[in-house]
Image (cartoon, rainbow, N blue to C red):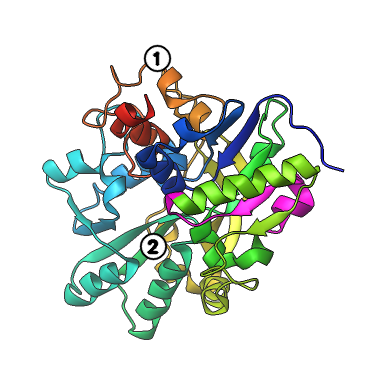
């Protein structure tokens, strides 16, 4: 017998690409009253804490070093507003935007007299490529390449989020990109541990709407299962080669998250046997938690506690050209999505 749906249903998307596509297509405005989409910690740049950005900025001061990073990282502020990698490059630091970790390996091969550090940011989506780059550097015997790993794990972060007594989410729209790597089985924790209706979704508006419909059917039936809407790409076992590559070069470690704080075994470090490619060891990087006073509510947005437009800084003090926090910087940030497509959402 089906249950009647009562009260507001909050569905959290845990993928920055979903966040942007939802805003672009105006999906929030299409949903019936009582169904609300909220953003979670799905943007890897957004969850990178200011103390880690500070470490990147300090690294840029090293003489003769080349920093390689994805474009989204260039404008993320550290603990001081306005201080970012883009500014450091303008001041003379050699900071280069690359499209993959392998691009950084090639730069190291082309310039053997310079030290090249790749800023490895992302979830399980980009972790295999970063791991493969370490393997390629080892194969080619490059002594001037290292990785500053800022890679994050999906499962511990979602579990830490759900353990918050104030957590108010009734279902999850699960990340399709991460699921391609981890597979359905890698996301089974949504069903077994968190025990909320969850659907692995594709990225077209039709995929997202279909996934929401699947979630609502579960809620109506009183079920809490993991379903896969993205069956054309996501397999039960995931990408076994990618998983093996990650396991060979990376190891779980405790990490610091923006909005979540320190979460045990929630990041990927570099295995000790490949320590020569670990920038943290090579340059003595030590990251300590900071207590920052700021009006930026990015941490609350990441945890699904606040809609971006409800932040007092949104669209006034904090804009994409002069951001206060990373949620307004990244192409996958909830604040950037809400700002860019505000006329559609309104």
x and y, in percent, of residue 230 in the image? 55, 62
Which of marks 2 and 1 precedes in the sequence? Answer: 2
Most foreground residue, 254 or 204:
204
In this picture, residue 36 sits left or right of residue 29 = right
x and y, in percent, of residue 139 in the image? 38, 85
Q: Name the quadrant containing residue 228.
A: bottom right
Q: Which mark is residue 312?
A: 1
Q: CA distance from mark 1 to mark 2?
A: 37 Å
Q: Which residues are magenta?
A: 188-205
Say if residue 239 shows up in the picture.
Answer: yes
Q: Residue at x 24, y 71 (%)?
A: 108
Mark 1 is surrounded, within 10 Å at the Cα level, by few (under 14), some (14 to 19) or many (20 or more) other residues, namely: few
Most foreground residue, 15 or 5:
5
Most foreground residue, 247 or 299:
299
- Which quarter of the rendering shows the C terminus? top left
Q: Secondary structure at mark 1?
A: loop
- Residue 69 painted magenta: no
Of marks 1 and 2, the one in the foreground: 1
- Residue 189 painted magenta: yes
Q: Secondary structure at mark 2?
A: strand
x and y, in percent, of residue 140 in the image? 33, 84
- Which quarter of the rendering shows the N terminus? top right
Single out the residue that lies furthest toward the right: 1
Q: Is the C-beta separation of discs 1 and 2 under 8 Å?
A: no
Single out the residue that lies furthest toward the top: 312
Q: Which residue is mark 2?
A: 147
Say if residue 124 shows up in the picture.
Answer: no
Q: Residue at x 52, y 58 (%)?
A: 176
């Amino acid at each position: 017998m089906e249950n009647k749906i009562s009260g507001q249903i909050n569905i959290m998307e845990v993928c920055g690409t979903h966040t942007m596509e939802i805003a672009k297509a105006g999906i929030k405005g299409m949903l019936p009253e009582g169904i609300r989409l909220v953003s979670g910690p799905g943007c890897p740049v957004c969850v990178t804490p200011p103390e880690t950005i500070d470490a990147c900025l300090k690294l840029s001061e090293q003489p003769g070093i080349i920093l390689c990073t994805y474009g989204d990282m260039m404008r993320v502020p550290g603990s001081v507003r306005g201080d970012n990698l883009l500014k450091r490059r303008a001041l003379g630091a050699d900071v280069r935007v690359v499209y993959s970790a392998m691009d950084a390996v090639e730069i190291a091969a082309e310039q053997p007299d310079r030290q090249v550090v790749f800023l490895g940011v992302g979830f399980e989506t980009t972790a295999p490529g970063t791991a493969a780059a370490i393997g390629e550097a080892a194969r080619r015997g490059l002594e001037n390449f290292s990785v500053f790993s800022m890679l994050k794990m999906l499962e511990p972060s979602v579990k830490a989020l759900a353990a918050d007594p104030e957590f108010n989410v009734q279902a999850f729209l699960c990340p399709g990109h991460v699921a391609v790597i981890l597979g359905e089985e890698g996301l089974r924790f949504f069903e077994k541990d968190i025990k909320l209706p969850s659907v692995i979704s594709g990225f077209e508006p039709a995929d997202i709407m279909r996934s929401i419909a699947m979630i609502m059917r579960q809620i109506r039936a009183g079920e809490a299962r993991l379903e896969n809407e993205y069956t054309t790409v996501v397999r039960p076992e995931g990408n076994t080669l990618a998983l093996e590559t990650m396991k060979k070069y990376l190891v779980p470690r405790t990490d610091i998250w923006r909005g979540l704080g320190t979460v045990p075994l929630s990041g990927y470090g570099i295995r000790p046997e490949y320590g020569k490619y670990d920038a943290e060891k090579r340059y003595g990087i030590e990251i300590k938690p900071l207590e920052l006073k700021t009006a930026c509510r990015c941490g609350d947005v990441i945890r699904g506690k606040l809609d971006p437009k409800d932040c007092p800084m949104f669209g006034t003090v904090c804009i994409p050209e002069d951001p206060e926090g990373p949620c307004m910087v990244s192409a996958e940030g909830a604040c950037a999505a809400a700002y860019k497509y505000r006329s559609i959402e309104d």
